Image (cartoon, rainbow, N blue to C red):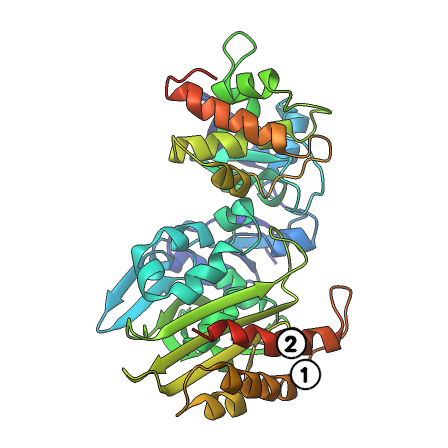
């Protein structure tokens, strides 16, 4: 059995230092130890994207990351994108456009979309579809999600949605 | 036997871990997916080894650091402009999330017959650079991979880079993958081609590599020889495609039948017609 280590990283802009086993999945640390349940376990093997988080600004699968890899990194979960009072433009647009149905894929979808908008302020629909292609949704048919991301991009550019 | 997960920041810190039997992990998208996220007891992560990063050109050779992720390679102008067949394969590998994590070295060591980067690297006659405590050595990728999941990696050795001699800009570089869906699909058949031509369009040298049609990526020397000296015309490509069907040895599996793979493999060549 591996000995516990202390991992220190930034989580949603707060510094976190936690003693835990280094071989645990990041997803389990977030949900089980830190009470952040936005990231979900869908497939547990990298195919559904429900567990997505941003690590140093890059969207990654927390079901395929080990706790030891977090040392010194900057992690943002869907909870860190925005708050109920001040939602991220993506979160606001998802709510407005009915892009949320059962909600299970939503945190991962917002992470993938936020990463896209950080990279590209004016994506076209094909780029949005590409960006969320690693995130499975079984309710919306994706159209409303793409609508929402396009609207969020427009809003960020100061256009009316 | 040690236990734990270690992320050494220098090769000097890595070698003792390998001597003690650590499982090497690069992006983790194959290793951890196979184990459904459960880590082996003793892991050495390569992600903090600066020497395994970078894309550079020196003395006419392009060096691709083994720990570069597929996303970062796709963003590299050298890869996009000089190795478009590889860029094309990278753009359809897994999903954006998988490309953000998975690495070139990992794709090679996983040694799947369907590994998306492998067919273009075979067609480009890529070499792998292997590093150990004793130093570095270089061998052709095609000799390094010996079967599904089997590579000629000696104990204490890691893949440190891929070395490619980029074809002239006039050469045709092509990659196409046929899968069951667009994202996250394991290829049913893939074809990578690097074809050099005289200014008149006569092929001087053709390299054809196919994925998912045998235990490793398969080059088709007979088909390559038949293309040499000819133009990329439909009649020629039909004949060469037929030869490809004879040179490959696909299997039936849950994604496709052997007969379907044979058909598609030959047909994919027709895309090379101008």
Neighbour tally class for label 2: few under 14, some 14-19, many 20 plus, Cα within 10 Å: many
Q: Who is closer to the viewer here, A95 or A29? A: A95
Residue B155 appears at what percent x and percent y?
53, 72
Secondary structure at numbered mark 2: loop
Which mark is drawn over residue B258? none
Work out whether disc 1 and disc 2 sit on a shared chain.
yes
Circles 1 and 2: CB atoms closer than 8 Å: yes
Above or below A46: residue B129: below
The residue at 44%/15% (across/down) is A160
What is the distance, in whole Å, between disc 1 and disc 2 at their CAs? 6 Å
Q: Which chain is indicated by disc 1? A: B
The residue at 62%/32% (across/down) is A143
Which mark is drawn over residue B249? 1
Q: Who is closer to the viewer here, B216 or A95? A: A95
Please say whether residue B31 is visible from this viewpoint.
Answer: yes
Rendering quarter of residue B268: bottom right
The residue at 42%/84% (across/down) is B206
């Amino acid at each position: 059995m591996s000995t516990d280590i202390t991992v220190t990283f930034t989580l949603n802009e707060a510094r976190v230092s936690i003693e835990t086993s280094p071989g645990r999945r990041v997803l389990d640390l977030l949900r089980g130890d830190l009470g952040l349940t936005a990231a979900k376990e869908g497939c547990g093997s990298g195919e559904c994207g429900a567990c997505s988080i941003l690590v140093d600004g890059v969207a990654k699968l927390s079901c395929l990351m080990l706790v030891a890899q977090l040392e010194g990194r900057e992690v943002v979960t869907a909870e860190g994108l925005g708050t109920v009072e001040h939602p991220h433009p993506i979160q606001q647009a998802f709510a407005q456009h009915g892009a949320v149905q059962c909600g299970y894929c939503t945190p991962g979808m917002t992470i993938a979309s936020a990463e896209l908008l950080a990279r590209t302020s004016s994506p076209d629909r094909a780029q949005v579809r590409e960006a969320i292609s690693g995130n499975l949704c079984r309710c919306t048919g994706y159209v409303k999600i793409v609508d929402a991301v396009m609207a969020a991009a427009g809003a960020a550019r100061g256009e009316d949605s | 036997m040690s236990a734990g997960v270690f992320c050494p920041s220098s090769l000097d810190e890595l070698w003792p871990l390998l001597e003690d039997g650590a499982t090497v992990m690069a992006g983790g998208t194959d290793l951890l997916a196979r184990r459904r996220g459960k880590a082996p007891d003793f892991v050495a992560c390569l992600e903090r080894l600066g020497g395994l990063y970078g894309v550079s050109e020196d003395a006419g050779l392009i060096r691709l650091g083994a720990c570069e992720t597929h996303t970062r390679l796709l963003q590299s102008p050298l890869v996009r402009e000089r190795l478009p067949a590889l860029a094309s394969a990278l753009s359809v590998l897994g999903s954006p999330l998988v490309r953000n994590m998975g690495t070139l070295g990992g794709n090679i060591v996983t040694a799947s017959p369907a590994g998306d980067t492998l067919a273009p690297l075979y067609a480009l006659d890529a070499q792998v650079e292997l590093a150990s405590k004793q130093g570095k050595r270089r061998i052709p990728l095609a000799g390094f991979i010996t079967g599904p999941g089997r590579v000629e990696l000696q104990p204490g050795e890691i893949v440190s880079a891929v070395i490619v001699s980029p074809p002239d800009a006039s050469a045709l570089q092509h990659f196409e993958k046929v899968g069951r869906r667009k994202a996250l699909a394991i290829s049913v058949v893939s074809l990578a081609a690097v074809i050099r031509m005289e200014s008149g369009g006569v092929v001087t040298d053709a390299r054809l590599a196919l994925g998912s049609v045998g235990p490793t990526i398969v080059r088709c020397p007979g088909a390559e020889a038949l293309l040499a000296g000819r133009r990329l015309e439909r009649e020629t490509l039909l004949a060469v495609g037929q030869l490809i069907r004879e040179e490959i040895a696909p299997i039936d599996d849950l994604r496709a039948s052997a007969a379907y793979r044979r058909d598609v493999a030959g047909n994919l060549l027709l895309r090379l017609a101008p």
